[in-house]
Image (cartoon, rainbow, N blue to C red):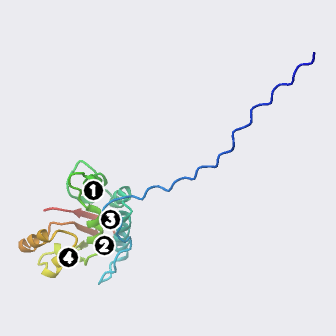
Amino acid sequence: MPTPPKPAPPPAPPASKPQEASAPAAASCSASRLSPIPKPTAKPLPPAVASMRERIIKAAVACDYAALQKLGDEKGKGVRFSYDPDQDMATTWRIQEEWTESPQPVLARLVHVLNLPFYQEGDLYWWPTAFRKDATDGDFALLNGIYPEEMIADMRKEKSYIGMRVGISADGDWQAAIQGD
């Protein structure tokens, strides 16, 4: 008796279509809906200062904390920032932004402040002008929409700006991003 033929192997499962990679979710932070393009300044900035300002704004709008940290360390570890001295700037800002009970719009304030007029003090370019000695009512008025009206009124009355201050040296070194007194 002849040997029966071996059964054919089962058919291969139908080829599945390769799954399309889903686009990564857009980063979310207080600055994510702001423009990544800096507003023009009334007076020209040195190219290195203008470049750093532009890159800080772009990274903040992208909610890219790692890029902000890298910019802060670009010319050495030297950005002074507010709050936890045992934590890096990016971690501290992420915690503040994502704080459930009372999130702080740190990155939005960073972008808004860098879009305000600046002043020069020695080798440093500072934002906003409300931080300078002898700041005017006009300097404080520019803060509307960035800080609560009551806070602005208190700072104006005390002649003491305690909001976000940003300092960049003439050679483009991001020196400070300070809040509080």
Residue 31, numbered label: 3
Q: Please identify the quarter of the rendering in which residue 170 is found.
A: bottom left
Could you say where residue 85 lies in the image, as x and y percent from the top left? 21, 51
Q: Is residue 159 left or right of residue 178?
A: left
Residue in view at x 92 percent, y 18 percent: 2
Tell me the kind of residue under disc 4: Thr
Real-space CA distance between mark 1 and mark 3, rounded to the nearest whole angstrom:
10 Å
Tell me the kind of residue under disc 3: Ala
Residue with the mark numbered 4: 129
Q: Of discs 1 and 2, which sits in the foreground?
A: 1
Real-space CA distance between mark 3 and mark 4, rounded to the nearest whole angstrom:
21 Å
Q: Of discs 3 and 2, which sits in the foreground?
A: 3
Q: Secondary structure at mark 3?
A: loop
Residues packed near mark 1 inside 10 Å, few (<14), some (14 to 19) or many (20 plus): many
Q: Secondary structure at mark 4?
A: helix
Real-space CA distance between mark 4 and mark 2, rounded to the nearest whole angstrom:
17 Å
Residue in view at x 27 percent, y 56 percent: 97
Nearer to us in this view, 96 or 8:
8
Residue with the mark numbered 2: 170
